[in-house]
Image: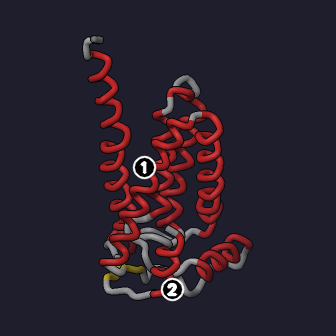
Amino acid sequence: YMPWFCYLEKRQTIHYLIHSPLDDYIPFVEYFIIPYLLWFVFLAVTGAYFFFTNRRDFYRLAAFLCSGMTIFLIICTIFPNGLALRPTIFAHDNVFVDLVKIVYSTDTPTNVLPSMHVFLSVGMCMALNRTPALKDKHGIRIAAGILSFIIVLSTMFLKQHSVTDVAAALVMDGILYQLVYARQARQARKLMHEPVI
């Protein structure tokens, strides 16, 4: 994944400029850099939780995430895309803006559709809500949902992604959820009703 992604980032070719009319109504808010960066912690903690507690759920999550990331690479290879939403002048001068500038300098505004920030956040939230181990841990599941929602918002308020990127990621989440989670649940129910020979 990483060599392919790095190649796409260095290519910096944009044939398709992503923009939605809704993007023009979303202001830049530098404070959203906090949940945006918490994404890395969220991924690491959730991945480690499944790896050390439930290998079956970990492999299911890995199948979900790797499928989505591969689709993302294929889309960006065939349809090189990017954004022109980032502000060049900032209204404030504070530590949050400084962090945004660091992110901007290390992450090019290319290869944005679908948003991996959104896809992976929602995917992690789905996995936490699907695992039987957290069935009665409502606080954890609600916290994961809120964090995922704020991370999704952060991608738009930081002008890292268009509404279009977010929508595409959510569609991909929905499709892969049906293939990885819902399909396995249906198979499990079917096996429970088969007679034992």
Q: Position of residue 34 (x, y in %)?
A: 65, 61
Q: Please name the residue that numbered disc 2 is placed on.
A: 10
Q: Name the residue rendered at 31%, 78% in the picture.
A: 79
Farthest front residue? Answer: 197
Tag 2 secondary structure: helix
**C-alpha distance separating marks 1 and 2:** 26 Å
Q: Image quadrant of residue 194?
A: top left
Label 2 is placed on what type of residue? Lys
Report the side of 117 relative to 25 (left or right): right
Furthest toward the right, the residue is: 95
Query: Image point 69% across, 70% down: which residue?
Result: 96
Q: Where is residue 54 in the image (x, y as percent from the top left)?
A: 57, 34
Relative image position of residue 101 (x, y in whole percent): 64, 79
- Of the residues shown, which amino acid type is indicated by label 1? Phe
Residue bearing mark 1: 64
Asked where in the image residue 114 lies, by quadrant, the reply is bottom left
For the rendered model, the colour scheme is secondary structure
Quarter of the image that includes the C terminus? top left
Q: Earlier in the sequence, mark 1 or mark 2?
A: 2
Q: Is residue 104 left or right of residue 85?
A: right
- The residue located at (30%, 37%) in the rendering is 183
Identify whether 170 is placed above or below 59: below
